[in-house]
Image (cartoon, helix red, strand yellow):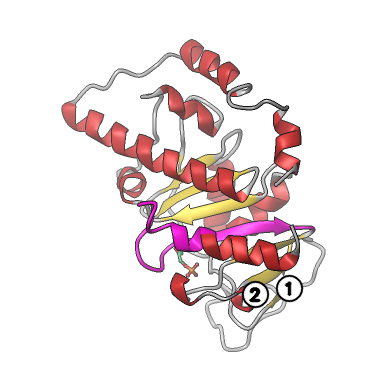
Amino acid sequence: MDDLAARTALIAACQSLNALGINQGNAGNISLRSGNTMLISPSAIPYDQLRPDLIAQMTLDPAQPTITTPHDPTGIWTSPWTGPCKPSSEWRFHRDILSARPDIHAIVHTHAIFATGLAIAHRPIEACHYMIACFGGHDVRCAPYATFGTQALSNNALAALEGRTACLLANHGMIALGETLDRALWRAVELETISKQYTHALMLGDPHILSRAEINEALAQFAVYGHAEPLAKAATSR
Ligand code: 13P
């Protein structure tokens, strides 16, 4: 994908969030790997005002020196970026996840209602439905609370994502990862769906939770589900 196509795809993904029912207003942010950099939605710009040149670009190379923006006493925006707008305040977890997970090429963060409801209750999503397996294991963890935009939040998110492709962020929202932008959006929708189902089951009381063995079987099925070609090859053809 060339640079303009990647920026255009990222904008289309941002603009689809509210229509997909997984976000409200200007909350949330999306990043997309581009070589050894990431493209990331700019901070606090309404999605309907995005243009390709407004997308921020940041290095994924930890050896790059950081700079401090003089007019930012919070220290949130302390890394170099290119573009006329500040990158999303959550650039740290986007950068840290993309750096740590070479299989992941896109990240969606939103304040989806049901996922965030569970996150406010600090309640991980248990294996209430076999679709939990599409997030890589038998549960979706909830990362402990930390202030938005901080390195502490990034560290908490990275730990909660160990062996997983999604997590909740306590009193904040959710993160979904994808081998491609489409896969990240698909997972974000699935995460909100299972969050809604789990919330309803919790309201009925005493939901039945599938066993590790049952989820292991689902994981084995997911490894071949829907792919006429090996997953690794599919991931490179984004
Ligand atoms: P940004 O507009 O800076 O991306 O912040 C939105 C958000 O959801 C922070 O968690």
User: For residue 168, which quarter of the picture?
Assistant: top left
Quarter of the image with the N terminus in it: bottom right
Residue nearest the observer in this picture, 67 or 95:
95
Give the image location of residue 52, x and y in percent. 62, 73
- Determine whether the residue tagged by mark 2 lies in a helix, strand or loop: loop
Residue at x 53% of width, y 69% of height: 89
Count every numbered label the image shows and give the total: 2
Horizontally, is 64 left or right of 48 in the view? right
Q: In this view, does 228 lie above or below 88?
A: above
Q: What residue type is disc 1 on? A: Thr
Residue ID for mark 2: 78
Which badge, 2 or 1, is on the more N-terminal residue?
1
Whether the residues at callouts 2 and 1 have beta carbons within 8 Å, the answer is: yes
Q: What residue type is disc 2 on? A: Thr
Compute the Cα span from label 2 to label 1. Answer: 6 Å
Q: In this view, does 235 lie above or below 33?
A: above
**Residue 19 falls inside the magenta stretch:** yes
Q: Can residue 177 be seen in this view?
A: no
Give the image location of residue 231, x and y in percent. 70, 31
Residue at x 36% of width, y 38% of height: 193
Magenta segment: 13-35
Q: Can residue 12 be seen in this view?
A: yes
Question: Looking at this rendering, what residue extends furthest in the front direction?
Answer: 228
